[in-house]
Image (spheres, rainbow, N blue to C red):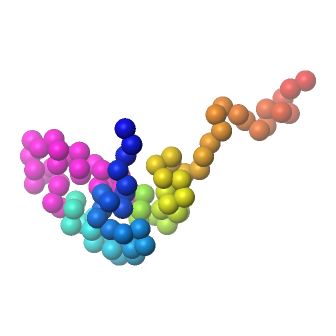
Amino acid sequence: MSKPCYYSILEVSKNCSEEDIKKSYRKLASKFHPDKNPNNIEAEEKFKLINEAYETLRDAEKRSSYDRFGHHNSRPQGRGFNPFDIFSQE
């Protein structure tokens, strides 16, 4: 199952400003905060997604990486290949 787009979660466009992200985060975090929605599992899950999206999009480097690679967390990584292993072989 794929994760929803962080921009959609925060209800902002992809070319929005940092201030737009912050405003939307505050509004949504307040709306779905567990203290305002006790015993509401859906609101709690939404709140977690909102925080996850905000943590990525508020940081310029993380946001740039997300824009390039999506949810694959930063840069693509090799599958178990270490380029320095070449020097350890005899």
Taking the view exactly as shown, the residue that stands out farthest to the front is 1
Q: How many marks?
A: 0
**Image side of residue 90 versus residue 50, left or right:** right
| Along the line of sight, the residue nearer the viewer: 90 or 75 | 75
Up the image or down, 19 lies above or below 53; here it is below
Residue 57 percent coordinates (x, y): 41, 62
Identity of the residue drawn at 77% across and 38% down: 83
- In the picture, residue 58 is in which quadrant? bottom left
Residue 64 shows in the view:
yes
- Which residue is farthest right? 90
Q: Main secondary structure of the magenta part?
A: helix
Q: Residue at x 31, y 54 (%)?
A: 51
Q: Residue furthest top?
A: 90
Q: Is residue 80 left or right of residue 70?
A: right
Residue 27 magenta-highlighted:
no
Q: Residue at x 54, y 58 (%)?
A: 68
The answer, for residue 65, to whether it is visible in the render is: no
Left or right: 16, with 76 as reference point: left
Find out whether residue 34 is within the magenta segment: yes
Residue 11 location in percent, x, y?
28, 64
Residue 22, quarter of the rendered image:
bottom left
Image quarter where the N terminus lies is top left
Q: Position of residue 44 (x, y in %)?
A: 19, 46
Residue drawn at x 90%, y 24% as measured from the top left: 90
Q: Which residues are magenta?
A: 30-55
What is the x, y in percent for residue 41?
16, 41
